[in-house]
Amino acid sequence: MRAFMMLLGVCAVVVLGGCNTVQGLGKDIEKGGEAIQKVAK
């Protein structure tokens, strides 16, 4: 039971960390798009 709880905790950290990374990547892409729009104007 203890090993299962440890595995569950590790999985939760990996999933939450992955979401944060994807969210950060989306923000970077958005900023790049805004910079391109400013140059195009």
Image (cartoon, rainbow, N blue to C red):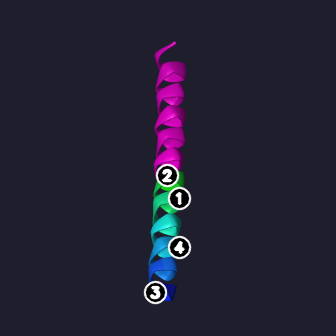
Badge 3 or badge 1: first in the primary sequence: 3
Q: Nearer the viewer, mark 4 or mark 3?
A: 3
The residue positioned 52% from the left and 12% from the top of the image is: 41
Q: Please tell me the numbered disc located at residue 3.
A: 3
Q: Is residue 26 magenta?
A: yes
Q: Earlier in the sequence, mark 4 or mark 2?
A: 4
> Which SS does the magenta portion mostly show?
helix
Position above or below: 5 against 30: below
Q: CA distance from mark 2 to mark 3?
A: 25 Å
Q: Does the CB distance between marks 3 and 1 fall below 8 Å? A: no
- Residue under pointer 1: 16
Most extreme residue toward the bottom is 2
Q: Which mark is residue 39?
A: none
Q: Nearer the viewer, residue 40 or 16?
A: 16
Magenta stretch in the rendered image: 22-41
How far apart, in angstroms, are the residues tagged by discs 2 and 1? 5 Å
Earlier-in-chain disc, 4 versus 1: 4
The amino acid sitting under disc 1 is Leu
Tag 2 near tag 1, CB within 8 Å: yes
Task: Give the mark nearest the N terminus, 2 or 3.
Answer: 3
- Cα separation, mark 3 vs mark 1, equals 20 Å
